[in-house]
């Protein structure tokens, strides 16, 4: 340990301890709480109590060379590692049963303590599910909500992209070290998130994607957030694991219902039966989270901002053009496209956003009707 300066030693010992096999959050804290300085964990292993003998033996030969490489990586701008005593460690995460001992963060570390909503769902969603995740995220960030997800393909990626599309903030919690991007196809998305939000992991640098890492990642996604929204999910899926973790953590769980014929709706329907709140519009989420008195500051202001955003669409020229033909009597989407002269993509996107805002309802057979004023 002589190679570390006094200013580096505290962090270096934490990094070394985290890399010891068999040292999870519980053992980490048990060790740290027995000593005055984390260096004593490695200097005085014979004095440590209640620790597995295999772990004690490993503590005698930590990989200090790897710790030096960790410190070098962390020396770059906007790279952080925080423990539970650090002022940036989020209070909500401390409340879960097994909060991470350390969090690696690339990006804006202050976002971890902001008002967050987790959005999760299938890796292979329907087009409608992907659009819903994107539009919910795009709408909600304009009410100062941070969107948190897992950087996976499908719903996760759509939620991150929706938040970024509205110049909002998003957090990606990953199941690898921060020096890896999984899936590799999301490298550009990860860089964009790091520049406009934060990427978070409890795993040391160099950790590869392993199946057992992702349930641990999921507990952080739900633990950081006041609520979790499930967009589409099969009955047996990681998204339902995240939702149930949120329930166990005492957080709100929201689910978007879907067609009874869509297998990706069954997970959401099961959650609703178990007590999740059925969501029809993004305002359903804002109003529910806003009711958590004492947790969210300036809630009324946030809701007002979101409502202003909801009404803004009515004054857009394209929306006015659509509303000329979209009334309070049902009309088929094909007729709307034909009469408005707008493209299929434009009309579909506008109808989805209006439905999220509660101004339009979709009916069977591809028909739509206005519900707002």
Image (cartoon, rainbow, N blue to C red):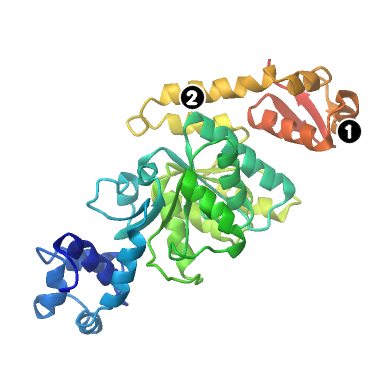
Residue 90 x %, y %: 32, 46
The answer to whether residue 48 is above or below residue 166 is: below
* Residue drawn 19% across the image and 66% down it: 30
- Where is mark 2, residue-wise? 303
To which quarter of the image does residue 152 belong?
A: bottom right
Residue 318 is left or right of residue 251, and the answer is right
Q: Is residue 372 visible?
A: no
Q: Is residue 262 visible?
A: yes
Helix, strand or loop for disc 2: helix
Question: Crowding near pointer 1: few (<14 within 10 Å), some, many (20+)?
Answer: few
Most foreground residue, 327 or 134 = 134
- Where is mark 1, residue-wise? 334
Residue 247 x %, y %: 44, 49
* Residue drawn 45% across the image and 64% down it: 179
Going by the picture, which residue comes out furthest to the top?
373
Residue 208 is left or right of residue 124, and the answer is left
Tell me the quarter of the image containing the N terminus: bottom left
Residue 325 is left or right of residue 39, and the answer is right
Q: CA distance from mark 1 to mark 2?
A: 34 Å
Most foreground residue, 215 or 187 = 187
Badge number at residue 325: none
């Amino acid at each position: 340990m002589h190679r570390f300066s006094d200013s580096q030693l505290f962090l270096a010992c934490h990094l070394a301890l985290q890399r010891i096999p068999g040292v999870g959050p519980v053992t980490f804290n048990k060790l740290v709480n027995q000593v005055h300085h984390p260096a004593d964990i490695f200097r005085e292993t014979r004095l440590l109590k209640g620790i597995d003998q295999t772990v004690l033996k490993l503590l005698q030969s930590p990989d200090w060379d790897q710790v030096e490489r960790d410190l070098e990586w962390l020396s770059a701008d906007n790279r952080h590692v925080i423990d539970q005593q650090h002022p940036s460690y989020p209070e909500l995460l401390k409340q879960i049963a097994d909060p991470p001992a350390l969090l690696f963060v690339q990006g804006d570390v202050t976002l971890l303590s902001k008002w967050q909503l987790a959005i999760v769902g299938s890796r292979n969603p329907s087009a409608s599910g992907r659009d819903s995740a994107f539009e919910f995220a795009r709408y909600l960030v304009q009410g100062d909500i941070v969107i948190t997800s897992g950087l996976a393909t499908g719903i996760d990626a759509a939620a991150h992209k929706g938040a970024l599309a509205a110049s909002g903030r998003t957090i990606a919690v990953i199941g690898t070290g921060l020096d890896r991007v999984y899936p590799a196809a999301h490298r550009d998305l990860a860089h964009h998130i790091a520049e406009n939000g934060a990427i978070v992991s409890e795993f040391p640098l160099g950790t590869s994607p392993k199946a057992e890492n992702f349930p641990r990642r999921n507990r952080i996604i739900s633990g950081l957030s006041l609520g979790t929204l499930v967009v589409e999910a099969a009955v047996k899926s990681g998204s339902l694991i995240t939702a149930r973790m949120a329930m166990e953590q005492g957080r709100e769980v929201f689910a978007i219902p879907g067609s009874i014929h869509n297998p990706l709706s069954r997970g959401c329907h099961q959650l609703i039966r178990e007590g999740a709140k059925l969501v029809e519009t993004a305002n359903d989420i804002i109003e529910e989270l806003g009711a958590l008195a004492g947790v969210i500051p300036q809630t009324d202001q946030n809701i007002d901002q979101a409502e202003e955003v909801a009404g803004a669409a009515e004054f857009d020229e394209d929306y006015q053009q659509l509303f000329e033909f979209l009334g309070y009597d049902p009309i088929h989407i094909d007729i709307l496209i034909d009469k408005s002269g707008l493209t299929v993509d434009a009309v579909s996107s506008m109808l989805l956003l209006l439905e999220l805002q509660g101004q339009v309802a979709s009916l069977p057979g591809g028909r739509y009707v206005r519900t707002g004023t």
